[in-house]
Image: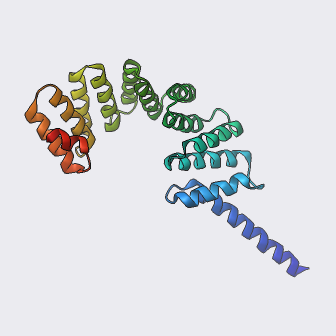
């Protein structure tokens, strides 16, 4: 009897260890294949709570989105939100996927819901601003980027995004100000140099454009636009 009891304890310990390993692997982002396998195991398993399954659907959705499998990712986020409604990360993840599927209106709706739950989250304003930008609404995009900068004034990428919106709206001076702010925060931000170079080129400021394109290529030789602009 003692041997049977010990065997049961060993089996129970092994099952708990495997369960903990699956949860840890599903939550990590280093190995995409391992993450997908672990999350799928949790989703199919009988020993996990609805909350754990919801997180697994979210994590698998993010992994699938990163791999370009946007339709599958959308299905995962829908399931995650069915199991755990009104979860900010669920709305944000689904918004990102909807944007990849060219559903800007759907992405904006999800960001709206997420911001109702967490209005002081800079990344959500950035995401919604990008969705408005993709949709062609530069005025609303600028408003969202501005709020994101108020919440997180040290984000070089947000200044760069707002610079793109100002450029599209025709306000080249404000675009240059934002690209310059991005470079001030992050002196090795190749894309900001590249984008500022475009504006200088548009304004006929050839020497400044050349300097920015050279700086961009020095930091990131793969920037084809900077290479073409320099040429």
Q: Quadrant of the N terminus?
A: bottom right
**Residue extending farthest left:** 207
Q: Is residue 149 above or below residue 51?
A: above
**Residue extending farthest bottom:** 3
**Is 110 on the left or on the right of 2, as rendered?**
left
* 67 and 159: which is toward the camera: 67
Residue 127 in view of the camera: yes
**Residue extending farthest right:** 1
Number of callouts in the render? 0
Q: Quadrant of the C terminus?
A: top left
Q: Is residue 81 above or below residue 108?
A: below
Location of residue 207 (image quadrant): top left
The colour scheme applied to this rendered structure is: rainbow
Residue 186 in view of the camera: no
Percent of width and height locating residue 153: 34, 32
* 93 and 228: which is toward the camera: 228
Q: Is residue 164 above or below residue 68?
A: above
Location of residue 40 (image quadrant): bottom right
Percent of width and height locating residue 219: 22, 49
Residue drawn at the location 25% of the way across and 20% of the way down = 171
Percent of width and height locating residue 4: 87, 78
Residue drawn at the location 55% of the way across and 27% of the way down = 106
Location of residue 3 (image quadrant): bottom right
Percent of width and height locating residue 128: 46, 28
Residue drawn at the location 20% of the way across and 32% of the way down = 198
**Is 211 on the left or on the right of 22, as rendered?**
left
């Amino acid at each position: 009897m003692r041997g049977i009891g010990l065997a049961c304890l060993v089996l129970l310990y092994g099952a708990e260890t495997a369960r903990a390993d699956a949860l840890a692997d599903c939550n990590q982002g280093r190995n995409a294949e391992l993450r997908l396998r672990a999350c799928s195991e949790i989703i199919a398993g009988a020993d996990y709570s609805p909350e754990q399954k919801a997180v697994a659907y979210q994590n698998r959705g993010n992994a699938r989105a990163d791999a370009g499998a946007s339709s599958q990712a959308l299905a995962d986020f829908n399931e995650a939100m069915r199991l755990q409604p009104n979860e900010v990360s669920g709305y944000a993840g689904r918004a990102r996927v909807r944007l990849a599927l060219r559903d800007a209106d759907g992405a904006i709706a999800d960001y709206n819901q997420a911001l109702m739950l967490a209005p002081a989250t800079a990344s959500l304003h950035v995401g919604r601003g990008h969705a408005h930008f993709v949709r062609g609404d530069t005025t609303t995009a600028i408003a969202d980027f501005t709020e994101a900068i108020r919440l997180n004034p040290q984000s070089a990428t947000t200044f760069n995004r707002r610079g793109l919106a100002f450029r599209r709206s025709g306000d080249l001076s404000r675009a240059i100000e934002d690209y310059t702010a991005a470079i001030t925060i992050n002196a090795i931000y190749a894309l900001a140099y590249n984008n500022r170079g475009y504006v200088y080129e548009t304004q006929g400021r050839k020497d400044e454009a050349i300097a920015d394109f050279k700086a961009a290529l020095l930091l990131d030789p793969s920037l084809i636009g900077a290479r073409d602009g320099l040429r």
